[in-house]
Image (cartoon, rainbow, N blue to C red):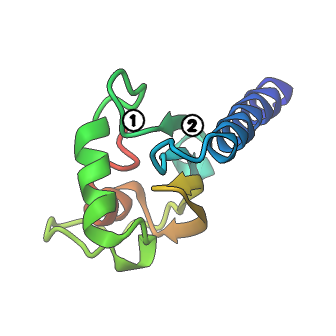
């Protein structure tokens, strides 16, 4: 539990460092640095995953290019992400996703809960597939 907390604090600190750097250099591109988290329910093992998406070369997100394309198509709005048409079960095992940081220089802070991981994947595509 404490290890997870310290990992999140470390990632958030790096995001704030990035934000300060972008503000200090007015000629820099309006960058992207998003902390993405997924919290599965007890039904799915109560797992917690997190990564940082920067939409740059060497991104740690395994599907970074596709995730960035999905975010670009929806303006980084979780509510605007529609389902891809796949069939999902009606098993209720809630999954909460968060997206916090900066998308193209604009602050982002969103939380969305989906009824299960299949529905989450159908709506968000590669964004939370890590």
Which mark is drawn over residue 40?
none
Please report the residue visible at 45 percent of the width from the left and 45 percent of the height from the top.
Answer: 29
Drawn side of residue 13 relative to residue 88, left or right: right
Whichever of labels 2 and 1 marks the residue nearer the N terminus, that label is: 2
Which mark is drawn over residue 130?
1
- Which of the two residues, 18 or 98, is positioned nearer the viewer here? 18
Q: Position of residue 25 (x, y in %)?
A: 62, 40
The quarter of the picture where the N terminus appears is top right
Question: Of helix, strand and loop, which one carries label 2?
Answer: strand
Please report the residue visible at 55 percent of the width from the left and 50 percent of the height from the top.
Answer: 43
CA distance for labels 2 and 1: 8 Å
Q: Position of residue 31 (x, y in %)?
A: 48, 46
Query: Is 70 drawn above or below residue 10 in the view shown?
Result: below
Please report the residue visible at 13 percent of the width from the left and 71 percent of the height from the top.
Answer: 85
Please report the residue visible at 45 percent of the width from the left and 56 percent of the height from the top.
Answer: 104
The picture quadrant where one finds residue 72 is bottom left
- Which of the two residues, 20 or 70, is positioned nearer the viewer here? 20
Q: Position of residue 112 (x, y in %)?
A: 54, 69
Drawn side of residue 40 relative to residue 75, left or right: right
Query: Is 107 drawn above or below residue 14 in the view shown?
Result: below
Q: How crowded is mark 1: few (under 14 residues within 10 Å), some or many (20 or more)?
A: some
Question: Of helix, strand and loop, which one carries label 1?
Answer: loop
Drawn side of residue 13 relative to residue 71, left or right: right
Q: How crowded is mark 2: few (under 14 residues within 10 Å), some or many (20 or more)?
A: many
**Labels 2 and 1 touching (C-beta < 8 A):** no
- Which of the two residues, 19 or 7, is positioned nearer the viewer here? 19
Q: How many marks?
A: 2
Which mark is drawn over residue 50?
2
The quarter of the picture where the C terminus appears is top left
């Amino acid at each position: 539990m404490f290890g997870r907390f310290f990992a999140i604090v470390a990632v958030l600190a790096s995001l704030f460092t990035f934000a300060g750097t972008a503000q200090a250099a007015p000629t820099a591109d309006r960058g992207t640095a998003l902390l993405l988290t997924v919290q599965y329910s007890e039904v799915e093992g109560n797992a917690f995953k997190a990564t940082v998406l920067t939409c740059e070369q060497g991104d740690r997100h395994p599907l970074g290019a596709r995730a960035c394309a999905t975010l670009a198509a929806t303006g980084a709005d979780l509510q605007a992400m529609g389902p891809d048409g796949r069939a999902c079960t009606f098993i209720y095992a809630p999954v909460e996703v968060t997206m916090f940081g900066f998308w193209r220089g604009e602050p982002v802070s969103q939380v969305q809960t989906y009824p299960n991981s299949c529905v989450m994947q159908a709506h968000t595509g590669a964004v939370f597939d890590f």
